[in-house]
Amino acid sequence: MDFKVGVIAGDGIGPEVTAEATKVLDAVGKKYGHSFDYTEILMGGCSIDATGVPLTDEAIAAAKASDAVLMGSIGGNTTTSPWYKLPPNLRPEAGLLKIRKELNLFANLRPAYLYEELKAACPLRDDIIGDGFDMMIMRELTGGLYFGERSTKEVNGVMTACDSLTYTEDEIRRIAIRGFDIAMKRRKKVTSVDKANVLDSSRLWRKVVEEVAKDYPEVSYEHMLVDNCAMQLVKNPAQFDVILTENMFGDILSDEASMVTGSIGMLSSASLNETKFGLYEPSGGSAPDIAGMGIANPIATILSAAMMLRYSFDLDKEADAVEAAVKQVLKEGYRTGDIMPQAGQSTEGITKVGTAEMGSLIAERV
Ligand code: IPM
Ligand code: MG
């Protein structure tokens, strides 16, 4: 089959890692008889440099015309880059928030999984890691604080900033349904994370999740306060299957979850709407400090491409092949710098490779 893939290479390490993901997709196409046609789409800092805004209407139209979009990363160093001297609505991140909203990408899936081969890179103690962990963070992506009214103004002579956190029951219900649906395909457990001891939005969240849970009698579910969840993620990560949560909590908890897998360079993500369309991106950032050096880990982006095969194109066999190729390469001892054994640990059988070599090794094993 032929698929139209929009590619947002973006900023920092984005272009390097997306190049490896398309390399792997091409290997999949060759082996399984598909073709992927790529359209470059500008977003983020590179779009600001070229057009003055982080996301143009043409870019949105190009994304909408694609079957799915593969993204690298956007943004730069927030203290030194000139992009951050611009008004907030013209900065790189505004482009990402806008595309999520325009395409209604309300469901963000962020799997965090400990590879047996990467146990050495996991910062947790062996007795905590146990047999590893495998969780899916379902983050609501188009509501809450990141999309509420905001202002900074002087009130009675004092500078006052305000961000508002709003959720409607419909917004909560649709993400909760996604969370429970995914749990049905996994270990049938949902942990809904909120701050219901303080926030009204969380109390509504809890009520709606309870209603949705009634339709899934096979799924066991619990509520957990977000501060406790932050602690439980490093205390006993294996207890989690699906973590269902609102936008900001999901942003923070998914970074934490990625770090306990050993490296943010391993964590893929999918942002989905009600159709088959999705935007697929690594959870990590643009890492401007290592951009252009050829040392970034492309695995998160390659695994995001695998999610694209699975969720947007219904190519499960092909997605399995990519995931197996990643496992195989790790088993053979290949590592980018971020997932190398820590100081004092054995490096026997381990080979350090750069971005392009890692991509090629995985492509060859598809
Ligand atoms: C992420 C990022 C974005 C977010 C930023 C860049 C706006 O941190 O995808 O997690 O907060 O959603
Ligand atoms: Mg984030």
Image (cartoon, rainbow, N blue to C red):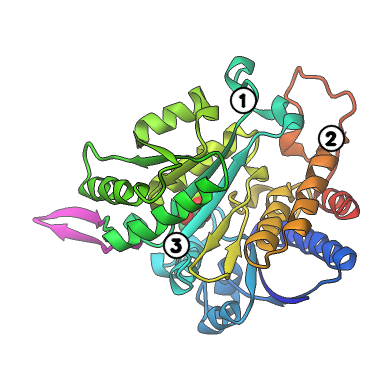
Where does the image place residue 260, in percent across and percent down from the top left? 58, 32
The tag earlier along the polypeptide, 3 or 2, is: 3
Is-magenta flag for residue 124? no
Closer to the camera in the image, 354 or 66:
66
**Span of residues in magenta:** 147-164
Amino acid type, mark 1: Pro
Indicate left or right for 289 with 331 as reference: left
Based on the displayed image, in which of its 4 quarters is residue 338 positioned? top right
Closer to the camera in the image, 160 or 100:
100
Q: Quadrant of the C terminus?
A: bottom right
Q: Which residue is mark 3?
A: 106
The tag earlier along the polypeptide, 1 or 2, is: 1
Is-magenta flag for residue 150? yes
Amino acid type, mark 3: Phe
Closer to the camera in the image, 16 or 34:
34
Distance from label 1 to label 3 (Cα)?
31 Å
Near mark 2 (Cα within 10 A), the count class, few <14, some 14-19 or many ≥20, is: some
Amino acid type, mark 2: Lys
Near mark 3 (Cα within 10 A), the count class, few <14, some 14-19 or many ≥20, is: many
